[in-house]
Every structure is written in structure tokens, then in C-alpha cells.
Amino acid sequence: MGAGHAHKLYRHGHSPVHGLPPHTKLAAVFAFVVVVVSTPREAMWAFGLYAVLLGAVAYVARVPAAFLLRRLLIEVPFVAFAVLMPFVAEGERVDVLGLSLSVNGLWGAWNVLAKGTLGVAASVLLAATTELRELLLGLQRLKLPPLLVQIASFMIRYGDVITDEMRRMRIARESRGFEAKGVKHWGVLAKSAGALFIRSYERGERVHLAMVSRGYAGSMPVIDEVTASPAQWSYALTLPCAALLVCLLGWSL
Amino acid sequence: MHVPDGFINAPTSAATGVIAAGAVAVSLRGARRELDERTAPLAGLVAAFIFAVQMLNFPVAAGTSGHLLGGALAAILVGPYTGVLCVSVVLLMQGILFADGGLTALGVNITNMAIVTTVVAYALFRGLVKVLPRTRRSVTAAAFVAALVSVPAAALAFTLMYAIGGTTDVSLGKVATAMVGVHVLIGIGEAVITALTVGAVIAVRPDLVYGARGLTQRLKLRVNGELVDAPDARPEPAPVAARTSHRKVWAAGLVTSLVLAGFVSFYASANPDGLEKVATDHGIDKKAEEHSTADSPLADYGVKDVDDARLSGGLAGVIGVGVTVVAGTGVFWVVRRRRTGDASPSDTTSMTSV
């Protein structure tokens, strides 16, 4: 995972947000999403304020709006679901443009759309300003079990390798005139998946042997310990604290 | 099926988060026993494999295509504990990196897609492999059934969570029928591909398939026109292997029955409730009433009132699953511990030779 291996969601930069220790960012994003989820859905203005807060973070982090919006497209399946909701939900109905819609369904659709979008936007900002390696170190600092962090780091480290093997197999299939058209070609694809599993597993064994021969005894040495000063913590937690204020206002008003 | 933020309310998300954390902790210990210190690289690579195979698209008909979910496949290929771990790690990374599935809904997602699919698939798989003749064909058949059931089971688990903490006002019957209906279709695709993939791996490296361990045939010699068992080249590992497999089968059977009992009771209590809802919508509640009382004793808890039925059904499901988890892990713990005490030297030799 050298310099050339930055994932495509990461935007290199030197903004104050990029410079924050990863575990403070992880904690801040998680707290922010928790606050957003526990806001009452009737307080529509609160969600607007949350969006403004995230916009401020994106501005400080110098993440362009177009990038953020493009990444939000991952949400499209839920949008389709949310659009359906006013039609299928129960309760009293209201006529909008000649369509009979459920009031509860409209609220539910708004609820899922607003909270889901804010959650995705927060995660996208986190991924855009934090390198993979840092993210894993941050998870470790947040007391995730070390074994889980190791598994995740191996998955990230070899994800590209395994995906590339899959791509090579696809090219090999296509160069022999194979084109998957329907159910009758599943057998070939499943054989590819089986071959991919065997290759991944055997690679895992080789990686393990290579690690053992370099003195691995069940735990990874931590070389770059990340620490956060109280100032950095308070800087990172500005976002969830502001959000909490908005949330409390939303409950009291 | 990645649930976004805000779809399930905060208390339910927190509760499922606790369940997910507990299950991941249990499988961390279990995976260490399945793979010992090879856990990190092997589970990591298998997680990368699951991640990659989820990107492999299978064309269904003109234009549409689906992809594998991988829970059942992971459980059968590398064992239930490692399977839970791999799928959970994939979900964690998808949530944090790709914003696929909400951060607060991580517990919901892991419980549904990593734990329910893997546990249901593996329990069914073990049960079927035990019942069916000991051939490779029956392993693929069992993989088919396990994958087929695991996907609608996850959909049902989602419906249960929705019943407890859903934030929208769509009726439970509609959610249940839509989720289970769609996921039965997805499950068929998942089942075909899982079975074919397991078959492909068994054909090449049967020793790698965790679920097919103990299927190796004894070497036979033809002496004077009749088959006799070849004398064992290594006499000492055989009794150990036989004894451990016996114990393993016994434990697996117990766990299977417990899990099935928990799952079936949940199914039996949740489904009539959904039926009842649909029935009251359509004005045919007479039939549903008979159905729910006839179906299971659990439904007797609250047939008079829908809310009561839902509550008691949910409680029964939760208690069943809880008892199952506690009992299952207890049994596995005791058995594995005794086994490692008995047979650690031969175990380590077989580990290094793989």
C-alpha cells in the first residue's frame, strides 16, 4: 500500500481536515450520524442545518461539490424505494397533483431520504479526506479487535490483486469468444469464481508463510502510532457537537 | 440489501449493533480455532475474494443481472466462524469506505447479511450433509439448499427488525411479502451459483472446502477380485480423526437442531402475523386465524390481538436465538477445548501439511 495505491475515493490534499488524526475523524463522523438519525423527522429545518454543517466541512477540506454529489449517486436504490413509499404506506391520504399519497408515507420517505443522504455524505467526506492505511490505524486506535483490523487490512491490501485476477480471467474468457448472455452461462462464471477462490486461498497461504518467515507470531508490529492532542479532538468534535445542538433544538421546538 | 441510515430507529440499531459485536467476538475466537495463526492472512484474502465475487455479475435475462451475496458460499468454503468474519469485514469496509449501507445501520447489516445468512446456511448445510449419502454430489446439493434458504432467511430477519424498529409506516405484511418474495428469487440465483462454485472447488481442491471435510473415501485394494480396505499407512491419526469427527458431527447436529428450532419458531411466529395483516387488509381473516393457531404453539401466545402476537412472536424468536447462540457456543467451546487437549500434536502436523 504505497503511494500509488491510494483508493479512488481519496482526494489528496493538505487541508486541516486531511491533517486530523484518523480516529478523531472516525469518532466525529459516527457521532454525527448518530445525532442525525435520532433527530425527529418533523424538524425539517434541522436537516437543512446539518447539510450546511457538512457543506462547511467540505469547504474546509476543499472537496469540490461536484465530487461529493457524484459520490452520492450510490444512494439511488434507496431513492427509488423512498419514492415508492408514499404510494404503498398506510394511514390518512392526501391528494397531490391528482395522486392519492399517504401522509405517513411522505414523512417516511422524507425521513429515509434526509437521514440516508446525510449519512452517505458524511461517509464520503471521511473517505475523501482519509487514506486507507490511516483509516485502519484509526480503527485500531478506537479499540477494534486487532485481529479484525488485520483481516480488514489484508482485505484492502489484496482487494485490488484479487479483483485484477478476476479481470484477467474475464479477459481470458472473452478472448476465447465467451460472452455471458444468460442463465445457461452461469456454469462458466461459477467455475471462474471457484478458481478465484482457490487462487485467493492459496495466495493467503503463501502470504502467511512469507509472514512467518519474517518473524510473524500472531500480531502486527505498530510502527506509526497515531495520537491526537486535545486540541485536535476538540477540532474534530466540533461537527457532532454543533449537530447535537441542532438536534436538541429540534426536539425542544 | 444494504440498509441506509435512518431506516431502522436508533434503539433497534443499537441493539443489533450489540448482537453483531457479540457474534463477531465469538467468531473471532472460533476463527482462531479454525485457522489458528493463519487467521489474519487467510480470512483477509477470503474477504477480498468475497468482495471481488460480489462484483462478478451474473446475467439473468436480457439486460438484467445479479450478483452473489456470498454468505452461504463463505460458510461452506471456509467454515461458519471465518465466514461471519469475512462478510462482516466486507460490510464494515463497504460502510466506511464506499458509504454503502449506513454507519449506524452497520449492526443491522452485519446481523442480517453476515450472521443470519451464514448461520442458517451452515446449519442447514451440516444437517443435509449428515443425512445425505457421503458423496461430492450431495455436498453440492446441500450447498444449493443452504444458499436457497439463507437469502430469504436474511430477508425475514430484516422484516423482524423492521417490525421492531422500522421508521416508516408500510404494513408488516407488505414488507414481509415483498422482501421474502424478491429474496426467494434472488435466493434461487444465489443457490445455483453457490452450488456450481462449491462444485468447481471440490473438483479441483476438495481439501479446501471446509464443509466437505471428512468426505474422503478410504483407499480400497482389489485382492482376488474383491475390494478390501487398504491397510492404513499412518495408523495413529485415524482414531483421532474418527473420534473428533464423531464429536464434531454430534455437536454440529445439536447446534443444527437448536438453530433450526430457533429459526423455525421465529418463522412460524412471524409469518402468521404477516399473513394475518395481509388477511385483515383483504378481509379474509377467518382463514388466517385458523392458520396461525394451527401452525405453531408459539402463535397461541397472542392470537387475540395482532400487537400481542407480534410482541410475543418477536420475544420468542429473540429468546430462541439467544438460547441457541449460548448453547451452541458453549457446546462448541467445550468440544473444541477437549479436542485440542486430546489431539494437539496430530492437529498441528495436519495444519502444517495443508
Image (cartoon, helix red, strand yellow):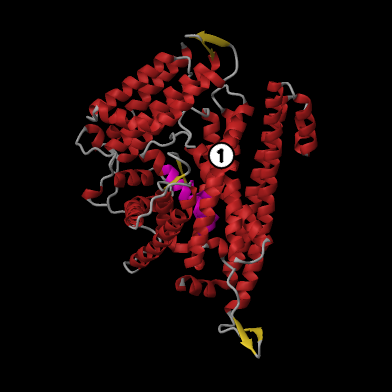
Rendered view: B211 above or below B155: below
Residue A200 visible, this angle: yes
Q: Nearer the viewer, residue A76 or A215?
A: A76
Q: Residue at x 56, y 46 (%)?
A: B188
Quick check: A118 above or below B241? above
Residue A129 x/y as whole percent: 27, 36
Q: Which residues are magenta?
A: B69-92
Q: Residue furthest left?
A: A14
Give residue B68's position: percent from left, percent from top.
47, 47
- Subunit ID for the residue under disc 1: B
Residue under the point 48% across and 27% down: A81
Q: Residue B141 magenta-drawn?
A: no
Most common SS among magenta residues: helix
Q: Quadrant of residue B316?
A: top right
Q: Is residue A85 above or below residue B345?
A: above
**To which residue does mark 1 refer?**
B183
Tell me which residue sits at (61%, 66%) in the image: B135
